[in-house]
Image (cartoon, rainbow, N blue to C red):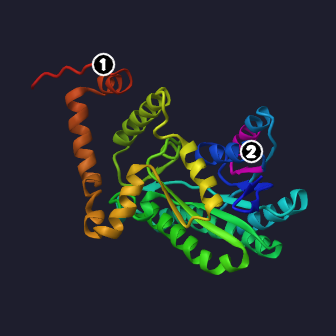
Amino acid sequence: MKINGLATRLVVVTGAGSGIGRATAIRFAKLGAYVVVSDIDLEAAQATTAMIRGNGNRASAAQLDVTSPDEWEAFARDVLADHGYADVLVNNAGMLVGGPFLALSPTDWDRQLSVNLMGVIHGCRVFGAQMVEHGGGHIVNIASAAAFTPTPVMSAYSVSKAGVKMLTECLRLELGPKGVGVSAICPGVINTNIGDHAVTVGVDEGLMDRGKQITRQLQEFAEKLPFSPMSPDLVARAVVRAVRFDLAVVPVRAEAWLGYFMLRIAPGINRTMTRPFSVDTLERLGAKFLDRFGESRLLARVVDREPVTTKRR
């Protein structure tokens, strides 16, 4: 298979045990590539590999902690020895640390940046060197709409993703003349399990648990629709499109495109669009909403579209 003149024979995807990484691995495999499915959770990587092989396509699983430079070095050497030069690397592995800035400790920042930013840097470095040596390839870094739309409760996550976007644009200038394309994908709200594994600091735990439960119910509801408004496959398609056309930055979903354009035409408005999502506001509205409707009735309304009857107190 050739995309943009690049023979995508071998594709490496990190964080491919679920969500966007899994969808991306499956899509490239369907297009005929051999996919190396990596994840810190080996069983999850093996499950994705089983899905790909079940469809008659080719893949293998590998365990990788993207925060470890040594593991990246060994992983890249193993891929080269076992399969040859990678044609495409998709740096997808990521996690979320949320909460008010003043509540975040240095450890929280280290945790966020070591995965979302340094993990991408390590991958670009080791596989970028191989691609330059080979004379071509393409690196796709999964960033986020948070890279250009500031959010009060996600400063660490937003900084990490803004770093990924800027890294991508720097590497396009540096590696492009050497035959290596580099793209950043910036999704909006996508149906993944990143929220389930998020680290939240300085936020009421009860409210966060209820929020996660409601989010899961919304995701289950979205999956039952005849169309897929938040499907990870939307991002997987964008990844393939970025490689095909050597695109620099690719927003995914309407809210991502809105933030991307507002940053350019009305940066002041873009900086304030998410102001209502402060911790204090969310906690106040969440408590008020649940007190009025009741958690069980709220979930029933979201999932089953049952009418909610209220009584004034």
Placement of 198 over or under 294, stated as above or below:
below
Q: Are marks 2 and 1 in contact (CB under 8 Å)?
A: no
Q: Residue at x 40, y 38 (%)?
A: 209
Placement of 144 over or under 191, stated as above or below:
below
Inspect the magenta stretch and tell me whether residue 40 lies in it: yes
Locate residue 244 relative to residue 202 in the image: left or right. right
* Few, some or many residues within 10 Å of mark 2 (<14, 14–19, 20+): many
In this view, the residue in front, 72 or 244, is: 244
Q: Which mark is residue 306?
A: 1
- Magenta region, residue range: 35-49
Question: Which of the two discs, 2 and 1, labels the residue nearer the N terminus?
Answer: 2
Locate residue 303 relative to residue 245 in the image: left or right. left
Image spot of residue 302 (x, y percent): 35, 27
Question: Looking at numbered disc 1 in the image, what kind of residue is underneath it?
Answer: Glu
* Few, some or many residues within 10 Å of mark 1 (<14, 14–19, 20+): few
Placement of 8 over or under 288, stated as above or below:
below
Image spot of residue 150 (x, y percent): 36, 63
Image spot of residue 139 (x, y percent): 67, 64
State which quadrant residue 88 falls in.
bottom right
Callout 2: SS: helix
Image spot of residue 189 (x, y percent): 44, 47
Q: Which residue is mark 2?
A: 29
Q: Residue at x 66, y 69 (%)?
A: 181
